[in-house]
Image: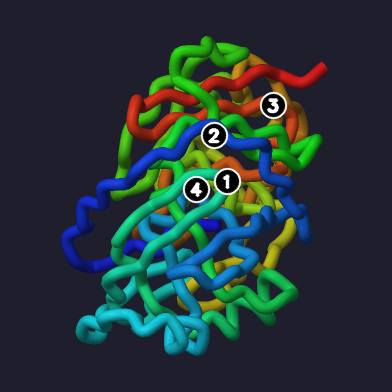
Amino acid sequence: MKRALLLLPTLLMLASSAAAAPPTRLELFRNRLFLPATVNGIRVVALLDSAAEMTIVDAPFAAGLRLRMGAAQLVNGSGGEDKGRFAHGLRIAAAGVTVPATTAVVLDLRDLSDRLIGRPVSVILGRELFDAARLHIDLARRSLAAVPRRRAPPGRRYPLTSQRGVEVFPVAVEGHAPAQAEFDLGNGSEVLIGKGYAERIGLLAPERIVGRSEGGGIGGGRSRAIVVLRTLEVGGRRFENVRAAIDDTASAADVNVGTSILRHFLITVDYAQHGLWLAPRP
């Protein structure tokens, strides 16, 4: 899912990493990932979103957590703007990793749950989990585990850099120079191409548009033009005839890749050490 970008300075959140634990079973629902977590000691099934700058909590669920609430804030998501509030004192645990005393955003997630996800969502677990530990993710086997940093991950390492609070890594679209793509396990739909980048490489020519698709996350729905990428190179693998939606929001990255592409790899990711390892599946 595209990030929820707060129109305020992003808070620095320090997380603690846990000892090795058995792999956590991921639930795949409509190409989106859910995992068990506890929030302030309350068990919940959370939507996993590596491109969410902060964890997001549904307002009714937050009411039962006795959080310290801040003032109303404007939130910019992939569908537009929404109003939320900062909530302080959130303690999150998932996959054997503990994230103490962090800050989250409280929003009404009913529209997102009904329109996009297809089931109630109480918590969107964002980058805090990825900041806290090195994670090994196998989407084919639906497992996620915190792993020791002393062990060399499988696959090739790609550098992660932050753009507007979201981690990006290099990919290549139709043979053009490498572009920076958001690593977005919360995106269960098409690859996204930012409108500005699409214009620069000629994807918005009338003959390239093959249809439209309804998308958009926080902030509401959006109708997006669909193109078919002749090639997309990710993690040393070349994909052909890839459907992609044009993201015309102001905060759009050049490229955003989600589970439709990432499921073809064994993934190891370490935000704190700015590394993403991708090993193509056979």
Give the side of residue 68 with respect to residue 90, left or right.
left
Give the mark nearer the N terminus: 4 vs 2. Answer: 4
Q: Amino acid at mark 1?
A: Ala
Measured in 3D between alpha carbons, the distance from the residue under mark 4 to the one under mark 3, in whole angstroms, is: 16 Å
List the residue tagged with mark 2. 146
Q: Earlier in the sequence, mark 4 or mark 1?
A: 4
For the residues bearing labels 1 and 2, Cβ distance under 8 angstroms: yes
Residue designated by label 1:
95
Sort mark 2 into few (<14), some (14-19) or many (20+) by Cα contacts within 10 Å: many
Label 1: element kind: loop
- Name the N-terminal-most of marks 2 and 3: 2
Residue receiving disc 3 = 265
The CA distance from mark 4 to mark 2 is: 15 Å
Q: Against 219, is 267 above or below? A: above
Residue 50's disc is 4
Q: Amino acid at mark 3?
A: Phe
Specify the amino acid type for callout 4. Answer: Ser
Question: In the image, which is nearer the foreground, mark 2 or mark 3?
Answer: 2
User: Residue placed at 44% from the left, 56% from the top?
Assistant: 52
As helix, strand or loop, the secondary structure at mark 4 comes to loop
Q: Residue 106, position in %: x, y?
A: 39, 78
Between residue 63 and residue 1, name the one nearer to us: 63
Residue 133 found in image quarter: top left
Q: CA distance from mark 4 to mark 1?
A: 14 Å
Q: Nearer the viewer, mark 4 or mark 1?
A: 1
Q: Nearer the viewer, residue 48 or 3?
A: 48
Q: Is residue 248 above or below residue 66?
A: above
